[in-house]
Image (cartoon, rainbow, N blue to C red):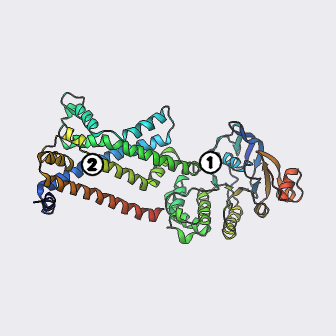
Amino acid sequence: MPAELSAFQLVLSGDPALFAIVRLSLVVSLSAVLLAALMGIPLGAWIALTNFPGRQGAIVLLNALMGLPPVVVGLAVYLALSRSGPLGSWGLLFTPRAMIIAQTVLVAPIIAALTRQTIEDLWLEYRDELTAMNLGPLGRVAALIWDARFSLVTALLAGFGRAAAEVGAIIIVGGNIDGFTRTMTTAIALETSKGDLPLAVGLGVVLIAIVIAINALAWTARRAGERLAG
Amino acid sequence: MRAPCEELPVVFDGVSVTAGPVTILDNISLSLAAGAPTVLIGPNGSGKSTLLRIAMGLMPPSRGRVTWGGRENAPPLKRAIVFQRPAMLRRSAAANIRFALRAAGIPRAGHAARTSELLELVGLGGLADRAARRLSGGEQQRLALARALARDPAVLFLDEPTASLDPTATKAVEDIIRAVSARNIKVVMATHDLGEARRFAGDIVMLHRGRVVEAGPAASFLDTPKTAEARAFLAGELLI
């Protein structure tokens, strides 16, 4: 049987094991994007609006961190969470939480760097008006983040794309344990190396479909919002 | 009627602004007091916008000092400004005004009524829910006026409010400015349009190359200018 055909059958049959893998992938990546946004958006906005010594260096570093190799992040988180590591007592290694931590580390710089650029551009446009309105620092940040919200969605999507696609970090800290820490990407890596191509292809199709669906959803929301708010 | 406000008079005492080797304002001494509008005229680059920014308190002078009702470093509580190219927040017209009301610390309970009142005043009552950035240039200028008035200012600075508008839009904006001035709000307006200066000015301050070349009541400035620069400007010569 051609690999593609049985892959689609697998997807269409709603196999519970497959469903669990898809679900875990989404939980891990979406949680990571959420956590990374909670850190990255304020950090990016702060760098955009604050003058401090070494700011230029911080911006270069942040931009460079967007290209962090997942395996290196996985290794670093592995070392931190391993029994003898500084956070070993948390007992998180080879759990979904460890995977969320690793992907958060991977995604936070992307969201922070894109937020920094977006907020800085908007601040140039708004600076005079907001200053003339005698708005305090918190009010400024809130106004800029709110008015940049449609562009920030793009930053979140870039982060989600990165998280959903990577395998290097989560396979190291998660261990690809069947039924516990196996995600779409780690399963694809494993099944391909085992030679079970139908499952690998099926998971690949599902992964791409999900990424497209989430982007389409975000795009639609952005267009609708922009029509209302300009 | 508003009590004589602590923002006025705005007094410039030997104010200079330099940017590197360039002198933008040169030893300006000037008092903007309550009453009819003061119009700043002068060619492009004469320092009108910088003077307004200083008067608003957006930037400190390089030398000299500015006081508002006798106070230095007074926060811009009852001052408002409309920039030449106002930035519209990425929100609806009404939300732009609500934002200004919030920033001015006005209690939330009155926001809805005040917002529609201000939109009506500038003739945008029907466009409350329209995205501000989708409005035309003239509509944006009027929204910027409403947003500035949301601060309930004692003094309103206007930087060439009609510079890029057609006659219809210009008339709409000028009508609003006239209404504002009639409400006892001090208007200080920069323009390089002599006709506009004639239509509004109680006092005229003429700037050229960062200096006040002549200042005084509009009638005497327009009829019997004392300086060569003022005569040249009034005669429509190109003042460079």
- Return the mark for residue B76: 1
* Mark 2 lies on residue: A165
Number of numbered discs overlaid on the protein picture: 2
Q: Is residue B125 left or right of residue B198?
A: left
Secondary structure at badge 1 equals loop
Picture coordinates of residue A181 (x, y %)?
A: 16, 45
* Quadrant position of the N terminus of chain B in the picture: bottom right
- Pointers 1 and 2 within a single chain: no
Local SS, label 2:
helix
Residue at 28% across / 43% down in the picture?
A103
- B49 or B66, nearer to the observer: B49
Instruction: Tell me the subunit letter for badge 2.
Output: A
Badge 2 amino acid: Ala
Which amino acid, mark 1?
Pro
Where in the figure is residue B193, as x and y percent of width and height?
A: 75, 60
Q: Is residue A65 left or right of residue A57?
A: left
Camera-nearest label, 1 or 2: 2
Q: Nearer the viewer, residue B56 or A14?
A: A14
- Furthest-front residue in view? A2
Of residues B8 and A109, which is closer to you in this image? A109
Estimate how packed mark 1 is, as few (under 14), some (14 to 19) or many (20 or more) residues with alpha carbons within 10 Å.
many
Q: Is residue A143 above or below residue A227?
A: above
At a point 60% along the width and 66% down the height, the residue shown is: B139
Classify mark 2: residues with Cα within 10 Å, few (<14), some (14-19) or many (20+).
some
- Percent coordinates x, y for residue A156 in the rendering: 36, 51
The residue drawn where x is 79% and y is 62% is B198
Looking at the image, residue A13 sits to the left or right of residue B184; the answer is left
Output the chain of dot 1: B
Which x, y percent locates residue A61?
41, 36
Distance between mark 1 and mark 2 Cα atoms: 51 Å
Where residue A38 is drawn, which disc sits there? none
